[in-house]
């Protein structure tokens, strides 16, 4: 078999070729049947030896950005914890580049569009990542040879704002929820405030992931790619017990009044209204997660424990909240205040008969240090003993 022909996924029946063209550029092509792949490989090699420039396959010329995007959405649904976010971003990108030949789009064109949206550095970087994912999957599928999104320069992000609910704000918000909203909404609020779950985690939660007897929630495929177990305090437990009655036979913990899964707009609608009536500004649903984390830190919970409860992939994410509890730094340095300084005598143990046989040189040096130290500390005693 030719060296440049291989079956990328063993047993799939789909064969690929790898070759160098007349200009010295390396190429990979997805072909299909093994025999077709071998024939095309020999044809490409002959063209390269004859100096004939490679003409791109018709299927590559006709691929539009929309086709690349559709393939990326299918990938996100299978492999991403929250594909809805990718779908939203991809939809905006398709509106701009949908019918353009995807391989003809350049880094300056993509960058110009992202800049024109005038978003925050974090949002800019998320769209950059989505673009890169679209082209990366196209390359894996044999539709493209390069990823122009990789050349887009990422923007420096700040540490992110930490907006949490004050005690007074919580009192006002609870008054509004109690007076004008349903018990269903109260349960949503309590669980968010007392578990710190992300919105996507909370509103896709199934009862199979919730163990009310053991008082815990086990989340699968979280944002950072790992599972997470969240213990339930008394407030969260009572809210879920009430919600179990409300949701009826639904598999989902939180559903709309007609029993359907939540959509993002439905959550924002009632909560944004409640915030406005409570005169609370610059606050979002995600800030309830910040509130959960902030209160843990201010209560003196170790940062490592907070990291596990929040599901942060790195301790650096949790460390953003450390300034809320400066006492833990003070306690850390206070620990060394109780440590007594050691002397040479403390650090050097007296030799034993057994140790002198095994390590004669070490024992001799230890004895010398002891004599020197005693002479320095008790000069009269040392002088008398020498006599």
Image: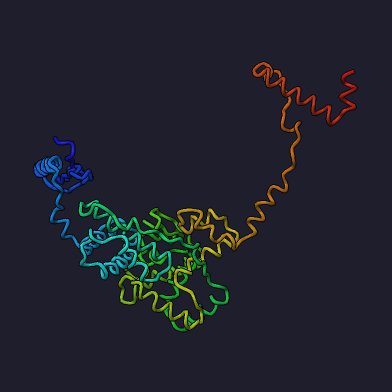
The answer to whether 355 appears left or right of 45 in the picture is: right
Q: Position of residue 330 (x, y in %)?
A: 67, 56
The answer to whether 371 appears left or right of 111 in the picture is: right
Query: Which of the pair 313/56 is nearer the observer?
Result: 56
**Up-down: is 135 above or below 251?**
above
The answer to whether 341 appears left or right of 307 in the picture is: right
- Quarter of the image containing the N terminus? top left
Give the residue drawn at x 73%, y 47%. 338
Q: Position of residue 133 (x, y in %)?
A: 30, 57
Q: How many numbered marks does the figure carry?
A: 0
Q: Position of residue 323 (x, y in %)?
A: 59, 61
Give the residue drawn at x 57%, y 77%. 168
Residue at the outermost front position: 51
Instruction: Work out whether residue 303 can be spotted.
Output: yes
Res. 63 image quadrant: bottom left
Query: Which of the pair 58/327 is nearer the observer?
Result: 58
Say how the picture is coloured: rainbow
Residue at the outermost top position: 357
- Quarter of the image containing the C terminus? top right
Give the residue drawn at x 21%, y 52%. 141
The answer to whether 211 appears left or right of 34 in the picture is: right
Query: Which of the pair 278/9 is nearer the observer?
Result: 9
**Up-down: is 24 above or below 134?**
above
Instruction: Work out whether residue 238 can be spotted.
Output: no
Give the residue drawn at x 90%, y 27%. 380
């Amino acid at each position: 078999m030719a060296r440049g022909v291989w079956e990328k996924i063993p047993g799939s029946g789909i064969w690929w070729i790898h070759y160098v063209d007349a200009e010295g550029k390396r190429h990979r092509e997805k072909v299909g049947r093994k025999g077709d792949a071998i024939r095309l490989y020999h044809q490409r090699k002959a063209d390269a030896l004859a100096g004939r420039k490679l003409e791109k396959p018709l299927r590559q010329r006709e691929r539009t950005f929309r086709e690349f995007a559709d393939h990326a959405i299918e990938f996100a649904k299978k492999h991403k914890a929250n594909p809805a976010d990718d779908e939203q971003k991809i939809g905006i990108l398709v509106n701009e580049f949908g019918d353009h030949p995807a391989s003809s789009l350049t880094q300056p064109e993509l960058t110009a569009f992202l800049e024109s949206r005038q978003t925050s550095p974090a949002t800019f970087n998320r769209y950059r990542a989505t673009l890169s994912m679209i082209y990366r999957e196209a390359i894996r599928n044999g539709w493209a040879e390069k990823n122009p999104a990789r050349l887009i320069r990422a923007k420096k992000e700040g540490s992110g704002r930490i907006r949490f609910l004050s005690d007074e704000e919580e009192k006002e918000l609870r008054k509004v929820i109690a007076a004008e909203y349903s018990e269903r909404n109260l349960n949503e609020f309590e669980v968010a405030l007392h578990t710190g779950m992300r919105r996507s985690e909370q509103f896709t939660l199934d009862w199979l992931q919730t163990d009310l007897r053991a008082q815990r929630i086990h989340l699968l495929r979280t944002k950072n790619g790992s599972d997470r177990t969240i213990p339930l305090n008394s407030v969260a437990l009572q809210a879920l017990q009430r919600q179990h009655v409300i949701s009826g036979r639904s598999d989902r913990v939180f559903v709309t009044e007609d029993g359907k899964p939540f959509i993002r707009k439905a959550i924002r609608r009632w909560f944004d209204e409640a915030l406005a009536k409570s005169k609370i500004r610059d606050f979002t649903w995600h800030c309830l997660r910040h509130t959960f984390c902030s209160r843990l830190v201010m209560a003196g919970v170790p940062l490592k424990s907070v990291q596990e409860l929040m599901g942060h992939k790195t301790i650096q994410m949790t460390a953003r909240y450390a300034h809320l509890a400066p006492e833990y730094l003070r306690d850390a340095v206070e620990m060394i205040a109780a440590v007594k300084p050691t002397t040479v005598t403390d650090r050097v143990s007296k030799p034993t008969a057994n140790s002198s046989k095994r390590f004669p040189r070490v024992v001799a040096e230890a004895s010398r240090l002891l004599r020197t130290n005693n002479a320095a500390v008790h000069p009269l005693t040392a002088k008398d003993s020498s006599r």
